[in-house]
Amino acid sequence: MSDTRAETAFIRTEMLAPELPPVTERGIIKWLRENLFAGWLNSALTIVSLLVVFLLLKSALPWWLNGVWNATSLGECRTIAGPEGGACWAVIKARWHQYIFGFYPQDAYWRPILAFALMFVALAPVLYYGLRNGAKLIGTVAVLTVLSLALLDHDVTHVVLIAVLMAVLFAVSWIAPKRLVYVTLLYPFVAFWLLWGGSVWKPVATLLGFGVMVLVYRLIQPRLGVIMGTAIGFLAACFYWLFVQGIITGALGSLPPGLAGVNSDQFGGFLLAFVIGVTAITCSLPIGILLALGRRSDMVLIKTLSVGFIEFIRGVPLITMLFTASLLLQYFLPPQTNFDLILRVVILVTLFAAAYIAEVIRGGLAALPRGQYEAADALGLDYWQAQRLIIMPQALKISIPGIVSTFIGLFKDTTLVSFVGLLDPLRGVTQIVRADINWKGIYWEPYIFVGVIFFLICFGMSRYSMYLEQKLKTDHR
Amino acid sequence: MAEAQKMQVTDEVAISISNMNKWYGTFHVLRDINMTVNRGERIVICGPSGSGKSTLIRCINRLEEHQQGQIVVDGTELTSDLKNIDKVRSEVGMVFQHFNLFPHLTILENCTLAPIWVRKIPKREAEETAMHFLTKVKIPEQANKYPGQLSGGQQQRVAIARSLCMKPRIMLFDEPTSALDPEMIKEVLDTMIALAEEGMTMLCVTHEMGFAQAVANRVIFMDQGQIVEQNEPKEFFNNPKSDRTKLFLSQILGH
């Protein structure tokens, strides 16, 4: 024992200077050793993987590199590409406008393009509230819009007017980014008018319905509270839309200014995917939040209704719902109501997504400690204040990955509308293209093209969600 | 506050609870509770775990519902009337064992949220009040940090400041130091003592017997959902009457 005692006494006389780790433990060598050659199994797998990658590239690369861009038919493509074969991108060059716009009238392409550009302006304050990032986004979109219009639209006044409009919006977003919220609120009506055309008074009359709702809410809320105010306001607006709006549009509907009307069956391609996807995404989030809250409510009726709705919608395949939208909904609605097919599909896709969103958000709500509710209660916040200020910001933050997954899934599911005869980019448009005698037998290229665009959009959403998670990370765990 | 008023207990009744009973399902948690708290009183409630002491003070701001009897806080009776409940809650501050700060808001926002939304105080004014109370609990420099960046003791002091920002007339403390390291307990207790010296009406569930002896003017001992004994701290600690109290005191003061 005396030995160990002698060893426990120790006094350092000089401090050690820090040194670099050994060569094998730093830089690229360390990375290679740890990630690719960590053991014999790992090394073998690395070599096999490299081999597989090599073989894949060897067989696929010539096809990609030998692609033909200028041809008028698949036969011509094959002649040009020669015996080793090559991709026939000429089909995309010839038919890209159908993939993007469907059968939308060619001279009106500026309308969906402008609507698409304005979508980013409307999104900017939502995505980057009060930040200059929004202005950068709008600036980029503005330049791209003007460029694509200059290439596509032969009417110079359109291009100039839109350039001026985008410049003004960019200036607003740079100087007062928060003001753009008004653009966001107006956007649904502007986009509707741009896309479907007709008299400007129709969307204005619809907008008035929301005015009615707000007015009634303002009158009732101080007396009967938030819930009654909202409910009666909503009913008043519905009454207006059902009975009064028709009279107004009847009187003003033919007055200028107006745009040439475009029918829903002329919509197609990514234009259609965006109309359905974006509307459903924006509407399903608030509905999903309400359903999630309803499912956790103490009120039996609200809880039962929410649970029933969610379980029913989640239990039924989307295609069934789409068939319902295209066929059955007509039976349930009063006769003579001629609901647009796209509108019907949008409504059902929205409800479908809302049920999933509700469950995702319920997961976020369940993850919050009970103490958060108690602290909000103890401070005297009422239910809606507590939800809006304390609970939802945290629950939504937790749910971001799930919500974005649902959105991505929803956006890709828009291709299912081909089953009810709408021209989705994947099946609808591709079938038309392949029915053309010139392009009969083409297979990979259209699908790759559509797939790449879908990937870019979904990947963009995914990256944004990661940015958002990073930005909202305040818990420092 | 004038010196004479310090630590002064008045005759005005702040909280009165009469014949109050509460059940969780069929389990009788609180049995026939009768107590009156005068304004300016500082009461410490202690007892073994599961004795219902937390439930009792949580009934006072209706985080828990009582099924029988009457609770009157500041002249407002607690019933299922939401307006009364919100009124009582805005007059009664509460500090929790696990702080329950809002992690997505800064310290300053935690403190100004309720004054702005419940009391409808302008933001500037609410921020000034918040900084005043943050200075009082000695952490004004943390105002723009998030709760996750603070130590437990600092978080609990923020929680106290957050409650004080509502200018409550009564403060409830639910085991405020139980989740803290020994080093941090002192800083929180000091804050509470300072608050007591200003004449705040306080109900505190705690096992800090030193604190009870220093500031309480009444100690309530609970067991099995009932008030077993209550007395002035000196008498309570030196001369406990009931056997159950003696046993409890011997166990917590034994080492």
Image (spheres, coloured by chain):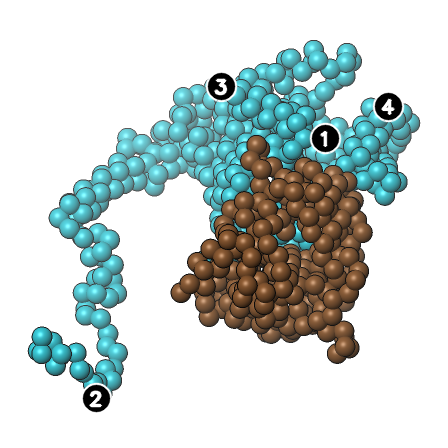
Nearer to us in this view, A307 or A150: A307
N-term mark: 3 or 4: 4
N-term mark: 2 or 1: 2
State which mark lies toward you, 2 or 1. 2
Q: Residues within 10 Å of mark 4 (few under 14, many from 20)?
A: few
Q: Chain of mark 2?
A: A
Q: Position of residue B250 (x, y in %)?
A: 45, 60
Work out whether B173 lies above or below A127: below
Secondary element type, mark 3: helix
State which mark lies toward you, 4 or 1. 4
Q: Residues within 10 Å of mark 1 (few under 14, many from 20)?
A: some
State which mark lies toward you, 3 or 1. 1
Q: Position of residue B253 (x, y in %)?
A: 45, 63
Indicate the amino acid at tag 3: Ala
Indicate the amino acid at tag 4: Phe
Q: Position of residue A206 (x, y in %)?
A: 81, 33
Residue for badge 2: A13
Would you say residue A166 is visible in this rendering?
A: no
